[in-house]
Image: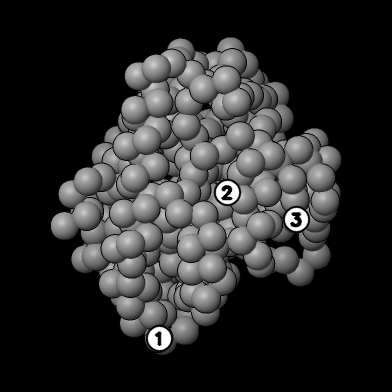
């Protein structure tokens, strides 16, 4: 585990050194980028093909606790590129033990946790507590509108997250998905998965990010991209206001970092990104809406702070 972490940190040092001699021409984003929402793919090549295709240097591999061989194959084939976050089914009694073991083996976070349970129910509360005890962030999928018949909902109701932020002040929560991002607007009432049009200031998500130092945000997926794209007058100030809280992620399922393969499968409501690479689209809107320093903070630095990817983790 130490080896994997050290390899990754080596890349941070290399990237820092590179930045002192200016932007690398082969890097489309002007500097290193870490994708905090990258689901582990089957082969090492499939993982690096996406990163290379969209110009992303590093990723947090979201990995089920039963896929550690796959994880290690990918880490070993590309030293200095990947760290990982562990996921398990929160409804299973062994979840706490499996996730604890994963963190002891080098996982730097819990999640993505995506399950048909209450946002304030016992299944998630024991994981919120565990994340606090283990001093790692926990990434949660919040969704109240199904994408297709029978999909169901996840971590509901979103509004009860506030009580959890209060109850677990030492836990670093990372919010993600439809309900988290739709509630950026004060007029949202579950009318659709991805509301469009101008954002009404004062949305619950905006307020929670302001009021709770233990809440962070994952900009991944159509949900995050939609929130940043729907109202260009709102976006720059939102990004600046929460500059310490926001982290780039893609949750992209394209194969090549250019929108190839099956993108947005089983989610017709996300058709606006069909055939596109979510990573590219979201990095483009971020680039357009931020200063160079703010882009670097959201695309690179904040993940290191929130996930404690620092030299102290070497000890
Ligand atoms: Zn998700
Ligand atoms: Zn992609």
Determine whether 162 is above or below 26 in the image. Answer: below
Q: Quadrant of residue 301?
A: top left
Q: Which residue is mark 2?
A: 177
Q: Secondary structure at mark 3?
A: loop
Q: What kind of colouring is applied to the model shown?
A: one colour
* Residue 184 coordinates in the image, percent (x, y): 52, 33
Whole-number angstrom distance, CA of label 3 to CA of label 1? 29 Å
Q: Secondary structure at mark 2?
A: loop
The quarter of the picture where the N terminus appears is: bottom left
Q: Secondary structure at mark 1?
A: loop
Residue at x 78% of width, y 49% of height: 263
Give the tally of numbered discs: 3
* Residue 58 coordinates in the image, percent (x, y): 49, 44
Q: Quadrant of residue 213?
A: top left
Q: Confirm if mark 3 falls within 8 A of ligand 1.
A: no
Circle 1 or circle 2, nearest the eye: 1
* Residue 202 coordinates in the image, percent (x, y): 46, 27
**292 and 265: which one is in front?**
292
**76 and 61: which one is in front?**
76
Crowdedness near tag 3: few (<14), some (14–19) or many (≥20) residues, C-alpha within 10 Å? some
Q: Which residue is mark 1?
A: 94
Asked whether the residues under the numbered discs 3 and 1 touch, taking CB atoms below 8 Å apart as contact, a structural biologist would say: no
Residue 73 - label: none
Residue 147 - label: 3
Determine whether 32 is above or below 1 in the image. Answer: above
Q: Confirm if mark 2 falls within 8 A of ligand 1.
A: yes
Residue at x 33% of width, y 72% of height: 105
For marks 3 and 2, the one nearer the N-term is 3
């Amino acid at each position: 585990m130490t080896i994997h972490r050290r390899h990754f940190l080596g890349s941070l040092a290399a990237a820092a050194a590179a930045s002192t001699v200016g932007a690398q021409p082969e890097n489309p984003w002007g500097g290193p980028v870490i994708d905090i929402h990258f689901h582990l793919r089957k082969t090492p090549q499939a993982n690096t093909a996406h990163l290379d295709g969209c110009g992303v240097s590093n990723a947090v591999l979201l990995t089920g606790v039963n896929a550690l061989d796959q994880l290690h194959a990918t880490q070993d084939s590309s030293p200095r590129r990947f760290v990982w976050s562990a996921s398990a089914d929160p409804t299973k009694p062994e979840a706490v033990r499996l996730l604890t073991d994963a963190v002891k083996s080098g996982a730097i976070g819990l999640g993505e946790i995506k399950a048909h349970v209450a946002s304030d129910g016992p299944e998630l509360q024991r994981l919120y507590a565990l994340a606090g005890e283990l001093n790692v962030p926990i990434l949660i999928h919040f969704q109240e509108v199904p994408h297709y018949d029978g999909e169901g909902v996840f971590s509901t109701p979103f509004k009860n997250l506030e009580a959890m932020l209060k109850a677990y002040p030492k836990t670093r929560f990372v919010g993600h998905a439809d309900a988290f991002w739709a509630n950026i607007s004060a007029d949202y009432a579950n009318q659709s998965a991805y509301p469009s049009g101008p954002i009404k200031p004062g949305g619950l998500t905006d307020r929670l990010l302001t009021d709770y130092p233990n809440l962070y945000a994952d900009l991944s997926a159509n949900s995050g991209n939609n929130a940043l794209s729907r109202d260009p007058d709102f976006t720059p100030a939102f990004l600046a206001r929460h500059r310490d809280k926001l982290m780039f992620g893609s949750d992209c399922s394209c194969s090549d970092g250019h929108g190839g393969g099956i993108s947005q499968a089983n989610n017709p409501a996300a058709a606006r990104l069909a055939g596109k690479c979510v990573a590219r689209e979201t990095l483009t809107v971020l680039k357009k809406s931020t200063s160079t320093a703010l882009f670097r903070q959201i695309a690179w630095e904040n993940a290191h702070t929130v996930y404690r990817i620092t030299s102290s983790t070497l000890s």
